C-alpha cells in the first residue's frame, strides 16, 4: 500500500503556515546542523589541497591519491549508511549524531598522526564511518519540522555546508600548504614536530571533536514517543524493502541519476586544484583562493536559488520539478565543462566551471527533498541514508578515481588531467540525462497515484498536498 500522509499526525508537516515559535526552532535546528555539515566537509575535502605534499612525502601516485580522496572515504560511508539510518530511525538522533561527529573528528586527527599510506587510508575510512550519521539525522529532523512546499529550501540551506565547508577547505588549505611548503617539520604545542600536511589534519580534526556536544542544542522527541505517535499515522507500518521493490525506479533511479552527476562534481572538485597548479603554473595559495571563492559564490547562488525555484515550481503543480531543474542545469553546464578543460586559460577555466557549480552541482537539498516527499515518517533516516549511500558510492567512488586512473594509465602524463576530466564528462552526461528522464516520468506517476489515494481515503488531504 502506498504511504498516505495523515495531516492529523503530530510529526507530519503540512503546508499550513508555521507559527513564529515553530519557525524559530526549525531554523535554529537547521543552523546547528549547517555548522556541523560545514565542519564535516572541511574534514572530508581538506585532502584535496594536499596532493603535492602527500605524493612527495609518501611517494604516492595520482591513482593512490584518488583512492584516499574517494573510495577510502566513500566505502565506509556507504557500508555504514543504511545501518546508521536504521539506528537513527530507532534511537536518539541527537546521540547518534554526537557520536558520529566525535568519531570522524578522531579519525581526522589520526590522519595527522599517520606515517604511512595505509594509516591515512584507515583514517579516511573512519571519517566516512562518523560522517554517515550526520545527514540522515539532519534530514529526518528537518523534514519533520518543515512543510513539503518549503522542504527543498530548508534542506538546501543545510546543504550549503558542503559549499561553505568545501570552499573553506580549499582557501585555507591552499594558503596553509603554500606557507609551509618550504618547511620540513612544524612544531605543534603538546604534540611536537610533525610534517606540514600532518599539522593540517590535526588543526582541522581537533576542533571537530570539541564540537560534538553542540548537537544537543537541537530538541527532539524521545524515540519511544516518536514511535508511539508514528504507530497511529498512515503509512507508518510500510516495510522498507517492500517499498523499494514496488517503486524501485524512483527510490533507486533518483539517487543513481544524481549520483552520476556527483561523478562530475567529485572529479572536478578533487582534480581542478591540481590541474591549475600543473597546467597553469599557479601556486597552491592562488589556486585555493580563486577556486575556493568561485566554489562558494557559484554554489551559494545555485544552492539557494535552485531550491527556491524548485519549491516555486512544485507549489505551482510541476510535480517533477526537482528532476527537471537538474536536467535543465545539465544542458547548460556540461558544454561549459568541456569548454573549460580545453580553454588552456586559468580564468576561463574558473568562470566556465562556475556554471556547473552553480546550476548543477548544488543538488543535495532539492534531490533529498524529492525523496522525503514520499518517505513514511518511520523510514526517513533510512531513505536519506540510502540516497547518500548511492550518491556517494557512484560519485565519490568513481569521479576522482577514474580521472586519476586515466591520467596515470591512459595518458601516462600528469599534465593530461584536463583530458581525463573531458573524457569523464562526455561519458557520464548521457547516462545522467537518460536516468533522470525515466525518474521524472515515474515521479509524476507517483504523485498522481498518491493524490488519488488521498482523495479516496482522506477527503481533506487535497488541502494538505
Image (cartoon, rainbow, N blue to C red):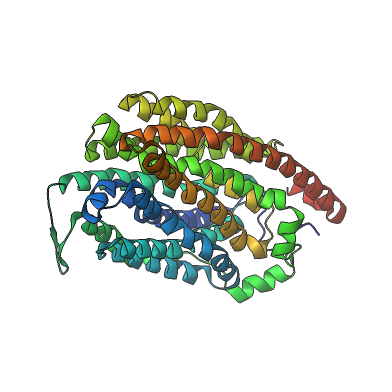
Toward the viewer: 192 or 87? Answer: 192
Q: Residue at x 24, y 36 (%)?
A: 286
- Judged from this view, the residue extending furthest toward the right is 456
Q: Residue at x 65, y 55 (%)?
A: 13
Measured as percent of width and height from the top left, residue 347 is found at 32, 26
Number of labelled discs?
0
In-image side of 13 versus 363 (left or right): right
Q: Residue at x 76, y 63 (%)?
A: 234
- Quarter holding the N terminus is bottom right
Q: Residue at x 16, y 49 (%)?
A: 180
Visible residue check, residue 49 = yes
Visible residue check, residue 7 = no
In-image side of 459 versus 28 (left or right): right
Using the rendered view, name the quadrant where residue 380 is placed: bottom right
Measured as percent of width and height from the top left, residue 278 is found at 27, 35
- Judged from this view, the residue extending furthest toward the bottom is 224
Q: Vertically, is 141 above or below 167?
A: below
Using the rendered view, name the quadrant where residue 280 is placed: top left
Amino acid at each position: 500500500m502506498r504511504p498516505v500522509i495523515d495531516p492529523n499526525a503530530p510529526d507530519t508537516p503540512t503546508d499550513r503556515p508555521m507559527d513564529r515559535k515553530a519557525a524559530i526552532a526549525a531554523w535554529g535546528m537547521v543552523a546547528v546542523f549547517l555548522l556541523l555539515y560545514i565542519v564535516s566537509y572541511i574534514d572530508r575535502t581538506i585532502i584535496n589541497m594536499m596532493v603535492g605534499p602527500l605524493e612527495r612525502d609518501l611517494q604516492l601516485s595520482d591513482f593512490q591519491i584518488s583512492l584516499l580522496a574517494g573510495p577510502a572515504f566513500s566505502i565506509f560511508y556507504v557500508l555504514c549508511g543504511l545501518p546508521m539510518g536504521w539506528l537513527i530511525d530507532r534511537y536518539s538522533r541527537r546521540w547518534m549524531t554526537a557520536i558520529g561527529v566525535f568519531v570522524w573528528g578522531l579519525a581526522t586527527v589520526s590522519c595527522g598522526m599517520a606515517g604511512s599510506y595505509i594509516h591515512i587510508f584507515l583514517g579516511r575510512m573512519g571519517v566516512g564511518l562518523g560522517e554517515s550519521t550526520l545527514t540522515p539525522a539532519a534530514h529526518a529532523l528537518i523534514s519533520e519540522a518543515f512543510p513539503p512546499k518549503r522542504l527543498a529550501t530548508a534542506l538546501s540551506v543545510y546543504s550549503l555546508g558542503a559549499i561553505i565547508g568545501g570552499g573553506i577547505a580549499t582557501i585555507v588549505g591552499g594558503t596553509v600548504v603554500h606557507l609551509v611548503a618550504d618547511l620540513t617539520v612544524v612544531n605543534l604545542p603538546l604534540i611536537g614536530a610533525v610534517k606540514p600536511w600532518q599539522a593540517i589534519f590535526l588543526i582541522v580534526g581537533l576542533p571537530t571533536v570539541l564540537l560534538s556536544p553542540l548537537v544537543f542544542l537541537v530538541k527532539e522527541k524521545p524515540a519511544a514517543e516518536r514511535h508511539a505517535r508514528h504507530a497511529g499515522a498512515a503509512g507508518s507500518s510500510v516495510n522498507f524493502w517492500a517499498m523499494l521493490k514496488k517503486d524501485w525506479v524512483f527510490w533507486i533511479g533518483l539517487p543513481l541519476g544524481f549520483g552520476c552527476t556527483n561523478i562530475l562534481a567529485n572529479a572536478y572538485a578533487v582534480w581542478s586544484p591540481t590541474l591549475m597548479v600543473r597546467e597553469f603554473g599557479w601556486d597552491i595559495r592562488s589556486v585555493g583562493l580563486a577556486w575556493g571563492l568561485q566554489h562558494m559564490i557559484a554554489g551559494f547562488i545555485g544552492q539557494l536559488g535552485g531550491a527556491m525555484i524548485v519549491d516555486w515550481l512544485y507549489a505551482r503543480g510541476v510535480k517533477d520539478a526537482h528532476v527537471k531543474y537538474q536536467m535543465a542545469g545539465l544542458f547548460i553546464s556540461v558544454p561549459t565543462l568541456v569548454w573549460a578543460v580545453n580553454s588552456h586559460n586559468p580564468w576561463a577555466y574558473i568562470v566556465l566551471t562556475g556554471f556547473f557549480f552553480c546550476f548543477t552541482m548544488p543538488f543535495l537539498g532539492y534531490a533529498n527533498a524529492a525523496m522525503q516527499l514520499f518517505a513514511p515518517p518511520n523510514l526517513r533516516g533510512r531513505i536519506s541514508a540510502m540516497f547518500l549511500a548511492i550518491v556517494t558510492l557512484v560519485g565519490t567512488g568513481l569521479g576522482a578515481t577514474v580521472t586519476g586512473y586515466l591520467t596515470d594509465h591512459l595518458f601516462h602524463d600528469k599534465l593530461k588531467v584536463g583530458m581525463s576530466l573531458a573524457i569523464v564528462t562526455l561519458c557520464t552526461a548521457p547516462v545522467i540525462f537518460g536516468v533522470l528522464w525515466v525518474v521524472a516520468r515515474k515521479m509524476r506517476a507517483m504523485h498522481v497515484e498518491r493524490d488519488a489515494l488521498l482523495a479516496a481515503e482522506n477527503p481533506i488531504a487535497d488541502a494538505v498536498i
